[in-house]
Image (cartoon, rainbow, N blue to C red):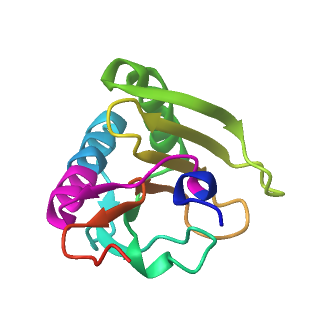
């Protein structure tokens, strides 16, 4: 039988759900600050979901995700924001693992980074609206999988 560590590449730590939500929310807010674009931001805050480990132990683990979008400004402002973000992330504890066009037909600019201290995953995509939609920056900040203090250990 595979261990959880083999499926995920690490052993999920026992953490307080609220603590992880606060951590993801804080990191997400720092991303918005680094963008320095005054636009509209979608509302929902960090949400806790099951972490899919690929095994039958999924209900034991949680992940906190905070997806949001920045919109209501032109591509010029969004492009400058992405440049600032790419510049600032390494200075703020993030390791950029990918920076360039994504695989979509629109070749949207994408930045993927991992926070070196918390291992939180960041995915930022600048959708220029070439498909007729409003230009926006899509942000997804996601924690590592963890076991909540009140989750049974099996």
Question: What residue is drawn where x is 43% and y is 81%?
Answer: 59
Residue 30, by quadrant, is top left
Q: Residue furthest front?
A: 1
Image quarter of residue 44: bottom left
Q: Nearer the viewer, residue 56 or 123?
A: 56
* Residue 91 x, y percent position in the rendering: 35, 18
Is 19 covered by the magenta stretch?
yes
Residue 3 in sight in this render: yes
142 w.r.t. 98: above or below: below
Report whether 76 appears left or right of 143: right
Q: Quadrant of the C terminus?
A: bottom left
Q: Is residue 110 above or below residue 73?
A: above
Please give the name of the residue rendered at 19% of the width and 67% of the height, measured from the top-left corner: 149
Q: Is residue 71 in view from this perspective?
A: no
Residue 104 sits inside the magenta stretch: no
Q: Is residue 33 left or right of residue 129?
A: left
| Residue nearer the viewer, 125 or 18 | 18
Residue placed at 68% from the left, 70% from the top?
132
Give the answer, above or below, for where 2 lies relative to 27.
below
Q: Position of residue 138 (x, y in %)?
A: 50, 58
Q: Outermost residue, right direction?
A: 105
Left or right for 137, reference 64: right
Which of the two residues, 12 or 47, is positioned nearer the viewer here? 12
Q: Which residues are magenta?
A: 8-25
């Amino acid at each position: 039988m595979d261990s959880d560590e083999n499926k995920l590449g690490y052993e999920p730590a026992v953490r307080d759900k609220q603590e992880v939500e606060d951590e993801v929310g804080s990191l997400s807010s720092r991303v918005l600050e680094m963008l320095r674009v005054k636009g509209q931001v979608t509302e929902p805050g960090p949400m806790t979901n099951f972490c899919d480990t690929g095994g039958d132990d999924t209900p034991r683990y949680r992940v906190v995700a905070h997806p949001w979008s920045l919109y209501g400004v032109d591509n010029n402002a969004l492009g400058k924001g992405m440049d600032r973000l790419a510049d600032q992330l390494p200075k703020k504890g993030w390791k950029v693992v990918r920076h360039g066009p994504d695989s979509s037909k629109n070749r949207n600019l994408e930045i993927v980074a991992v926070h070196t201290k918390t291992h939180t995953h960041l995915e930022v995509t600048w959708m220029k609206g070439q498909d007729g939609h409003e230009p926006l920056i899509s942000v997804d900040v996601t924690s590592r999988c963890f076991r909540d203090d009140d989750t049974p250990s099996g």
